[in-house]
Amino acid sequence: MTDAFDAIVIGGDANGLAAAATLARAGRRVLVLERSDRVGGDTRALAFAPGFRAAPLALDAAWLPPRMLRDLKLDAPALAPYECPIAVASPGESLVLPADPSRAADTIRRYSTSDAAKWPEFAATLERIAGFLAPLYQRPAPDIATTSSAELLGLAGLAWKLRRQGRRHVAEWLRTMPMSLQELLDDWFESPVLKAAVAAGGVRDIRQGPRSGGTAFVLLHHLVGAPGGSVRGRGYWRAGPDAIPATLDLAARARGVVVRTDADVARILVSDYAVTGVALAGGEEISARLVLSSADPARTIRLVDPAWLDPEFVHAIRQIKFRGATAFVLYALDELPGVPPLPDATRALTGVVSLTPTVEGLERAYDAAKYGRMSERPHVEITAPTLRWPDHAPHGKHVLVARAACAPYRLEDGGWDAAHREALADRVTDVIACVAPGFADHVMHRAVLAPPDLEERYGLTEGAVSHGELTLDQILFMRPVPGWGHYSMPLEGLYLCGAATHPGPGVGGGPGWLAARQALRGATR
Amino acid sequence: MPKRYDAVVIGGGHNGLVAAAYLARAGRSVLVLEQRPLVGGAAVTEEIFPGFKFSVFSYVVSLLRPEIIRDLDLPRHGLQVLPLESTVTPLDNGDYLASWADPDETRQELYRHSPRDADTLPVFGRLMHHMAMAVKPILAMVPPDPGSLAPSDLAGLLRLGRHFRNLGGERFRALYKLMTMSGGDYLDEWFECDPLKATKAASGIIGTFLGPRSPGSAYVLLHHYMGEIDGAFRAWGFQKGGTGAISDTIARAARAFGAEIRTNAPAERVLVKDGRVRGVVLGTGEEIAAPVVVSGLDPRRTLTQLVDERDLPTEVLEGVRRYKFRGSSGKVNLALAGLPEFTCLPGAGRHLRGAVSISPSLAYLEQAYDDAKYGEFSHRPYMDIVIPSMIDPGMAPPGKHVMSIFVQYAPYHVNGGWTDQRREAFGDAVIGTLSRYAPNLPSLILHRQVLTPADIERITGLSEGNIFQGELALHQLFFLRPVPQWANYRTPIRGYWQCGSGTHPGGGIMGASGRLAALEILGRRRPSAVVSPDR
């Protein structure tokens, strides 16, 4: 048994590496164990046809918390994301929304002058409300039940910050969070296509439709740290989909972190309710007093002998709503198809093009999932990542990634077999062909990633890209499970540090950074 | 010289009457103006068909605050609640699921369906009890404005914070889950028996435009447990003589304290001068002067129809415009020649003295919601059925019966609008669905009254037919009800107050809004006192 490390981090994704870098900066000797052959986690590109690659889960740039950048001395300018437009296209019409509010207003005017007039204020409102979340996302989630007065003081400070922005804004923030997208958008706009364009950003990776309460929060979550005017995330990394883990990998190694790939952790070793190390699949045991896991809690507890686990805790973890509902179809194309409704398809396909032109269409795409069925007419969003990263396809060829919702992890008529996958891909192809006639003729190869495939390839329970849905009952102090919102687990020395913990998915390394800081504090609860 | 009162209350609904009674009790001269020939608003009893009396809209009581019953001495004025002891859910396989007055019997019954759930039920009940205890003091509290720096608001916030902290982490988080989750998800964590979950979840969708799988639909589950904890009477019950008799009881109490009540007296306009209320103008043109005017109407009527919009700041008008009504329920009242025979429980058993719930599965309710989402009434709706004449024989001629069917969903904004034809089609869907469980029902119907949300709006004045004066959704509760900064029963017009269900805590025949508004008018801030549960 080797005894060279103070801490072991399971998982070489952005969160695992951020945790490792944070621990190393505090002088700890850290080992990162990555199951696959390279770091990157869900930002890794998959080769799906000879010469073609795609990283379907990392098309959007994550938010990098400024405090983390400062803490880890990361080079922020090198990580500046590129902005890209978001668009909605359907046969005969399209709407392209650039991030710049006044230019966006110009394109909206075609549909509604009143909507165009309200757009800049709407964009500013979203930015402000999302801005309130930013400080909450750079500290462990405040918990009213906590007894620590320091934490209460922190809470009061946050409240004061919020209040300083104006009396009205406090209520506006609290009112908006639990709303449905439909209610929020009906308050502002009349144009169906504009509402659909915004709403698409709030039903990402959640098994809910835009009429469901709390979907306004999902939209806001993905807008934290986004450039003003954006209604859909933060653009993309010029350096490639894995820009953050690559940077964090370098930063971690520079501080002496040892990163081992092809190192599959089979067990977390526990003795007397305290962690003692891990055992790899090959039988090798590595000891450490501190173990952080960036895998989701459901996977993490499977590594622990159940005898050591509090049954209530295990029960709570089983109750987490993972609910993967997003599937991807990856297309290898001999050339990019024309999309006649879009004025500049090449520019639009650099970003996200939603093919669902109404909020009702988004809602209907979700209905079937409630009953364990695949949508008849899924909500499809397409992006051509090769317009950003040409090396993902042979010269002159392209990749098109189609994100399809809702495709529930559990189907009532049996599991995801080849027939289900083909049926889904056919439906998605049909939807694309509606706006891109002749699309099917350009397809050289296609691959389907249904939720069970995402589970297998990326280690996501139920294929949940979110590591647990971003519903109001699974965020902040409720994440990952009620009572355990501060990264620790009921075993001494064991911490969760992945996207299943606060502040959740789409924050590059944020959960890992915060988890490591908690671990350093040694707070067991 | 116009007539003069210390206070005029617009709207003789139960909240308006409660407010009037409290004001009169404190020695104020009070006039209540009711547009209809009878008081009660949505809590009225009417003889719709000769010999058949109906609680036309609201049909059960459980939430009437015990402090109101005590303060106004309502039993002396005729309050008499008869218990509604059971709920039976007929199932599609011919079986049923019942919950009876005796908890042990309920558990045995559930044991037939799921031994595991039978064991869980008491644990769940205890948690709900604690949750209801945790919420109860908040129902009796004037919402503090979280954005305000006024001492009273800060003190209220502090008390609230302390209250939640005193709950302890576990209970606070359980309450938070209840506030944010969907009823379906919440119950999935506890139970496996689908009809049980559906019947419980149904209480969470009543009066909202949410499905049982929509987040935010778990909270109203609590209301089911709220009545129980007060111990004054059983969870759900009938007022003898129908819900209108409750309104009459409160009206009698108000009169006994000296309040005047005028029916057939619709208020046309509230007089405002220099940002201060001066009185009320009636439909007849008559003016009544008063330094205090209290509106029991919903926020849309109170703030945009009774007063000139120029007297209100734009953000308040905007807030009212954004306030969601979205009426989603209807009512079918039947005069019956005899008793319906349910296939699952033949005969005139005790189940007919309780409620019958058409909620065989969560998917059934969700599909009913799917219809409504896209602008149709539910073709297989959720129904809550009671036969008041079984408990109070005075409601129908001897041997005959009245049946009250609460139906959801019937969207106010139905595709093509509500026409006579569509109303009857809706009624047919209700009877058609119900006759699957009680095949003899159609042959018993002597008369039927079908009420859509449009009818509810037309008759009672409730905007969009929403029975709670606005949805009980998370973003419309507490200090957000009806609009931020004006959740303390005041309005931007001095002397003009709101006391309807569109204010905190709203919903059901609770009377709390009317009481809190009156206490605020009288300048007693006592209600924000929060006491910890279990003490």
Image (cartoon, coloured by chain):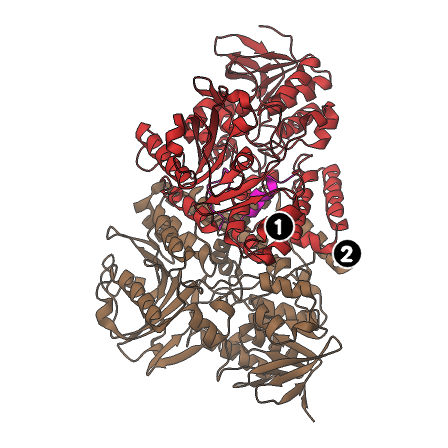
Chain colours: A red, B brown
Secondary structure, mark 2, is loop
Identified by mark 1, the residue type is: Asp
Identify which residue, B71 or A520, lies in the foreground: A520
Q: Is residue B312 above or below residue A138?
A: below
> Vertically, is B356 above or below B92?
below
> Image quarter for residue B274?
bottom right
Q: Amino acid at mark 2?
A: Leu
Q: Position of residue B178 (x, y in %)?
A: 52, 48
Which quarter of the picture shows residue A344?
A: top right
Q: Are marks 1 and 2 on the same chain?
A: no
Which quadrant would the N terminus of chain A be assigned to in this image? top right
State the image coordinates of residue B458 (x, y, percent, origin top left): 46, 75
Q: Which sits in the foreground, B75 or A450?
A: A450
The residue lying at 55 percent from left, 71 percent from top is: B69
Q: Chain of mark 1?
A: A
Q: Which stretch is magenta?
A: A203-224
The answer to whether residue A296 is magenta is no
Q: Which residue is mark 2?
A: B149
Q: Which residue is mark 1?
A: A106
Residue A428 left/right relative to B299:
left
- Looking at this view, is A420 or B2 the one in front? A420
Can you see residue A13? yes
